[in-house]
Image: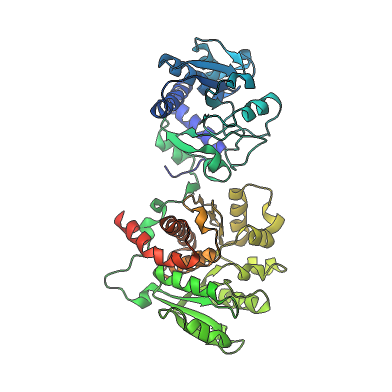
Amino acid sequence: MDELLSVAEMYRADQLAIAAGVPGPALMEAAGAAVVRAVCERWAPHPTAVLCGPGNNGGDGFVIARLLLEAGWPVRLALLGTRSALSGDAAVAAERWPGPIEAADPYILKGNPLVIDALFGAGLSRPLDGLARAVVEAMEGRTVVAVDVPSGLHGDSGRVLGAAPQAALTVTFFRRKPGHVLLPGRTLCGEVVVADIGIPDRVLDGIAPQTAVNDPSLWRHRFPWPALDGHKYARGHAVVLGGARMTGAARLASVAALRAGAGLVTVACPADAFPIYAAGCPSVIVEPLEDAGAFGRLLQDTRKNAVLLGPGAGRGAHTRAAVLEALEAHRACVLDADALTSFSDSTEELLDRLDKRCVLTPHEGEFARLFGDSVGMDGDKLSRVRAAAARSGAVVVLKGADSVVAAPDGRAVVNVNAPPDLATAGTGDVLAGIVLGLLAQGMDGFEAACTAVWLHGEAGCMLGPGMISDDLAGALPGVLRALKAQG
C-alpha cells in the first residue's frame, strides 16, 4: 500500500469501485466503521463531539456518530451548514442519524471532548475562513481524530489552507495521499491509519498512480548485491571530484560510495591537496590533477563509469568545466552543491546537457537557483520536482525531511524515514556518495536515488541523536544487512 493517490485519483478510485458494483452508501458506512474501530481501539468511551461538514466527509461523520452512539459513547453531533443542503450519500447518512443535529460552533468543544473532525476532506481547495476557521482553531489543545485529513490540510500538497488542527490520529481510506507524507501535513496528521473500505485493489489498474512512499519494495529486487563469482571491477569504478579547501566533503562522499558497494573509488583532486586526501581512507584511490586537462584525460578510461561533482569542489569556472567534461564523456553523474551553483548564471547551459543517467541532489536554495520560476516555485513540492525532472531530463532529489525523488517520465516518491538528526553538516555529501556508489554498480538513476535516500534515512535512524556525518557511512553495513535479511 505504498501508492500515494492524489485527490483526483482518489475520486477516480471511488468512481471505479462504484462502477464495479460497490454502492456509494456502503463505502461511506465502511469508512465510518473503520474510524469507529480505530477510535475504540485507542480510547475508552467518553464524551465525544463529531463535527460534520457539508460534503461526503460530513457524511462519514454522521456514520461515525451513529456507530459510536450504538457502542455506548456519549456523542454530540454538530453540522457546519444545514441538513437540507446535504446531498447524495451524505444525505442518506444524515437520515440514519437518530439524535439531534446542533449547529457547528466552537462552543460544542467546551468540556474538552474527544473531537472527530469530519468537516472537510482532502479536496478542500480554498483557505478556511469565518465560522469554519473558528471551529477548526477551537480544536487546538484537544484530542482530535481526523477523517481523511485534518480539516484545512490540502490533500495533494500537505499545505495548510488557513488553519488546520493537530490530529492525534488520522484515518484515511484505501491509500494515503501526498498530503499525509509531505510537510507540514505529515506532522499534523499524527498517527495515520489506512483503512480498507471495500475498494478493490484492481481499480489501481485504471489509475496507474505514479507517486509512492519510498520503500524497499519499490527497488529491492534491483539492488546490486555482490555476486559469488563477481569481482571489484564488475562493481564499477566511481570518481569523486575533490576540492582544494573543503576536502571533507569529497572524502565523506568517497567512503559512502565504497560502503554502498562500488568496487573502486577514486578522488581526483588538485595536486597541492593530494597529501590531505592521501592521508584519508586507505580504501580510496587518490589521483592528483596536475593541469587543466587532467580531469578530462582521467575520464577517457571507460572503466570509470560514474562521477560525482560538487561536494567541496568550489564554485566557479573550474567546477563548471569539470561538469561539462563529465557530461560530454557520457558518464552516469551525480551533481550536487557547487556543481549546481556554479551554473546559477547559466542554468540553460547545464539543463540542456542532462539526461536520465544524471542525478541532481539540491536542497531548496540550490533548487531555486537552478530552476527558479521555470518550475513554478509557488507550487507544491511534488509538482515542482516533477517539473524540474521533466525540464532537465535528469532525476532530481529535492532534499529535506520529506525528500522527493522524481524521474523525467513522471514517477516520483516521497521519503519518510529521515530523522531530524540528519540536519547537520556533511550528510548531503554522504547521500551523494551513496547515489554514486549505486550508479557505479549499474542501477538506473531513479532507482539509485530512491535507494540511496532510503538507506541514508535508515542509517540516520540507526545512529540517532548525536550522530555526525562521519558516522553515516559506517552505519551502512548494518542497514544493508537488515535489508538483505528481508529478502
Quadrant (top left, top right, bottom left, bottom right) of the N terminus? top left
Q: Going 41% across and 74% down the picture, which residue do you hit?
A: 236
- Front residue (pair 357, 433): 433
Tell me where residue 403 appears, x and y as whole percent: 54, 54
Residue reaching furthest bottom?
A: 290
Hey, which residue is sitting farthest left in the picture? 228
367 or 146, nearer to the observer: 146
Q: How many marks?
A: 0
* Residue 355 in view in this figure: yes
Is the residue 400 above or below the residue 116 in the image? below
Image-quadrant location for residue 81:
top right
x, y percentage for residue 17?
45, 30
Q: At 68% across and 34% down in the image, what residue appears?
A: 127
Residue 21 visible here: no
Q: Is residue 119 left or right of residue 251?
A: right
Q: Vertically, is 379 above or below 447? A: above
Question: Residue drawn 56% across and 62% down?
Answer: 361
The colour scheme is rainbow
Quarter location, residue 132: top right
Across and down, in percent, residue 266 comes to 47, 79
The residue that appears at 61% across and 71% down in the rendered structure is 339
Q: Quadrant of the C terminus?
A: bottom left
User: Considering depth in this image, is 427 or 378 the residue closer to the camera?
Assistant: 427
